[in-house]
């Protein structure tokens, strides 16, 4: 399109980056459509089907006539089940009025940021971070401030780093644990150290994204909201996409103080209203069914993690961190920068991921999208055969770079 033709679009949309994970998936699909055997490790979703008992509940919801608009914040029974889950899994006390169900945790996060951030407010984002955090902060005209962990430090963030990043304009801190893309997990002690710092700054809120809670290989999940002295300022985000393999159903939620929950309800009421009725009834069944299916899937991810790590560690020039949760490996690949193949020089993670896609026909996401250009993200939510073949091709292709 010409410059003139795009000028009618708002500054808001033109300055927004396209989600790179979605863009990469699109390119991979294009190559596949041309007949190439593309192994797609760029997706942020389980390769498992949603468990049957959840599908059955959705069918029943349809037959029972749940086809009408739903309450904006979610059906009362779903909000109650979420309250029960937060008590059972996280020892957190909430009431249904503290819960807002949204069309995916992505919407929950957007609601929170839109409800809290004024233009010019600073939002501290623990980096590497999930792709949408920075863009949604920019949409709210906030200023993203990255606090970065590196592979040398197991992607940990120190309390001192947090303290140094805080200013009188800081409004919100955002992180995910288990983390997408690194797979790092904050321990209770680490979160407590952050909470102690934030206790000194009563104007700062925390968005704790716990969507990978059920895919945690350490066996221990800690929530920032567990610290009573800061709980009122913590918004816990969670959802069904990852743990229950329900990405397409679009159900996420927050637990927060009532004022924030009401604000998110109000925001959502003007944008999408209540989440799909059938998906909500399926989510009720998911929670009532407990964690069994999630644990089975998590065991499979752990096995695949070790399979991929073993093969990846044999490839020269790649440094890996052993992910403690989620289903991604986020290796450091900067030793390939400056190398080339057939005149094509690799200058950054984007060049490298395009090279890997074009040469190995393996789709990955450049670390740049997550605030870490020295890395590349591989999902291991794929079959053993695909993972083994992807690593074989990767090794062969990277060896061509000199
Ligand atoms: C860290 C993180 N938070 C939130 C989301 C959004 O999940 P949902 O599918 O519920 O919108 C994702 C999905 O990739 C994620 O990785």
Image: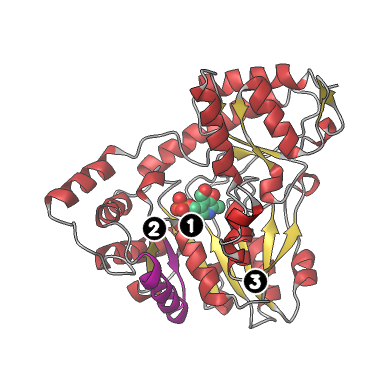
Instruction: Give above or below for 390 relative to 270.
Output: above
Asked if one can make out residue 217 in the rendered structure from this viewpoint, the answer is: no
Asked which quadrant contains residue 140, the reply is bottom right
Look at mark 1 in the image and give the residue it sits on. Answer: 106
Residue 133 x %, y %: 60, 59
Asked if one can make out residue 243 in the rendered structure from this viewpoint, the answer is: yes
Report whether 106 appears left or right of 266: right
* Picture disc at residue 52: none
> Looking at the image, what colour scheme do you see?
secondary structure
Dot 3 alpha-carbon crowd within 10 angstroms: few under 14, some 14 to 19, many 20 or more? many
Q: Nearer the viewer, mark 2 or mark 3?
A: 3
Instruction: Report the residue at 51% width, 63% height from top.
Output: 109
Instruction: Give above or below for 173 relative to 25.
Output: below
Dot 1 alpha-carbon crowd within 10 angstroms: few under 14, some 14 to 19, many 20 or more? some
Marks 2/3: CA–CA distance: 23 Å
Q: Which residues are magenta?
A: 253-272
Look at mark 2 in the image and give the residue it sits on. Answer: 103
Q: Is mark 1 within 8 Å of ligand 1?
A: yes
Foreground residue among 95 and 187: 95
Dot 2 alpha-carbon crowd within 10 angstroms: few under 14, some 14 to 19, many 20 or more? many
Callout 2–callout 1 Cβ contact below 8 Å: yes
Marks 2/1: CA–CA distance: 8 Å
Asked which quadrant contains residue 38, the reply is top right
Residue 375 x %, y %: 73, 40
């Amino acid at each position: 399109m010409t410059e003139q033709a795009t000028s009618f679009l708002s500054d808001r949309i033109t300055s927004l980056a396209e989600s790179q994970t979605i863009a990469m998936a699109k390119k991979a699909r294009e190559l596949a459509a041309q007949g190439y055997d593309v192994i797609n490790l760029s997706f942020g979703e389980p390769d498992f089907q949603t468990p049957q008992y959840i599908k059955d509940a959705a069918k029943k919801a349809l037959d029972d006539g749940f086809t009408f608009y739903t309450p904006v914040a979610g059906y009362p029974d779903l909000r109650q089940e979420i309250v029960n889950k937060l008590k059972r899994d996280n020892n957190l006390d909430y009431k249904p009025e503290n819960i807002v169900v949204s069309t995916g945790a992505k919407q929950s996060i957007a609601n929170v940021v839109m409800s809290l951030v004024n233009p010019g407010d600073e939002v501290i984002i623990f980096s590497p971070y999930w792709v949408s955090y920075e863009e949604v902060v920019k949409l709210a005209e906030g200023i993203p401030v990255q606090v970065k962990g590196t592979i040398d430090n197991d992607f940990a963030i120190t309390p001192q780093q947090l303290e140094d990043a805080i200013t009188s304009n800081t409004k919100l801190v955002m992180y995910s644990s288990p983390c997408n893309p690194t797979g790092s997990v904050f321990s209770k002690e680490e979160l407590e150290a952050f909470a102690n710092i934030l206790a000194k700054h009563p104007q700062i809120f925390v968005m704790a994204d716990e969507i990978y809670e059920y895919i945690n290989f350490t066996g221990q999940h800690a929530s920032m909201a567990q610290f009573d002295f800061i709980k009122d300022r913590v918004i816990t985000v969670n959802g069904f996409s990852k743990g229950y393999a329900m990405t397409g159903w679009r159900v996420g939620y927050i637990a927060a103080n009532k004022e924030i929950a009401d604000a998110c309800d109000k925001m959502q009421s003007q944008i999408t209203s209540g989440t799909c009725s059938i998906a909500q009834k399926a989510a009720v069944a998911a929670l009532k069914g407990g964690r069994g299916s999630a644990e089975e899937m998590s065991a499979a991810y752990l096995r695949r993690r070790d399979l991929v790590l073993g093969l990846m560690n044999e490839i020269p020039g790649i440094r890996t961190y052993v992910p403690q949760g989620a289903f991604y490996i986020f290796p450091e690949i900067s030793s390939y920068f400056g190398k080339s193949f057939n005149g094509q020089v690799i200058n950054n993670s984007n060049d490298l991921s395009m090279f890997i896609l074009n040469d190995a026909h393996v789709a990955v996401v450049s670390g740049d999208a997550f605030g870490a250009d020295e890395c590349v993200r591989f999902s291991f939510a794929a079959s053993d055969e695909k993972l083994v073949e992807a690593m074989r091709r990767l090794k062969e292709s990277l060896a061509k770079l000199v």
